[in-house]
Amino acid sequence: MSRMVAHLYLSPHLDDAVLSCGGLIAMQDGRDEPISILTAFAGDPPDWRITPFAAELHARWGKPGPPIAVRRAEDRLAAGRLGASVVHLDLLEAIYRRGDGERPLYPDRAAIFGSLDVQDADTLNGLIESLGGLDLENARLYCPLGIGGHVDHRLVRLAAEALHKPLTYYREFPYASRGEVIPEDMGDPPGIWRIYPITDEAIQAWDDAILEYGTQLSTFWSDEDSLFNELRDFVFEKGGVELLEPDR
């Protein structure tokens, strides 16, 4: 990171932090608090040997050009709308990772929402090393809870917890709004839940930022109205964005 930040959001993919915390980020920016979003799995895939599952996702994303480069561009636009800077690590997301003999570690949807593959330890170690090299002395660190159980969300939480620093956990949207929970084997971290009210203006900024992720919208929503309605309901259900904070 090139500047001191007050808030550092750890995002497994090139959308998770904005999807989950965009309204909160907008309000922090409104108070001139420096914010950065670090995406762990933002590396370019080896196009010549992607799995059929990955190829299917690329087709669904629908935009021409290198798929992850396109998504990095979307992320810069979305974060910029909210006043946040971005850091993109070059680790491969789950759909591209392979083990011994070029075996795909996560060849389908069931796999990416299942348990971590035993041959994925190098990914965790690389992520821990990358996070450990950051200057986190004055930054509040936000970490995904792992709601829904995506293996990349699991890895980010494990790596963040390995730093042994105070963590503020966020609930992943839209998984949390659709009744998904933290897998039993991960468990609930200790801490105290706190709700941060979000203004209508910040909700609109949040929605506008999410709309920058054109490759991802059809995965979750049928149209823009359904996104806005679910986002608004997600905020109104709790009266704001709910975070799990360290019990000091």
Image: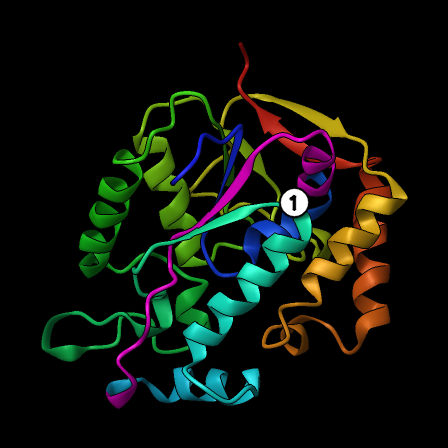
Residue depicted at 83% across the width and 61% down the height: 228
Residue depicted at 26% across the width and 80% down the height: 46
| Image-based side of 123 in relation to 240, left or right | left
- Quadrant of the rendering where the N terminus is positioned: top left
Q: Which residue is mark 1?
A: 21
Residue depicted at 30% across the width and 85% down the height: 47
Residue 30 is one of the magenta-drawn residues: yes
Q: Which residues are magenta?
A: 25-48
Q: Quadrant of residue 95?
A: bottom left
> Disc 1 on helix, strand or loop?
helix
Image x and y of residue 162, in percent: 30, 32
Judged from this view, the residue extending furthest toward the left is 101
Q: Does 232 sit above or below residue 163?
A: below
| Image-based side of 41 in relation to 220, left or right | left
Q: Does 168 sit above or below residue 88?
A: above
Residue 208 is one of the magenta-drawn residues: no
Q: Quadrant of residue 44?
A: bottom left
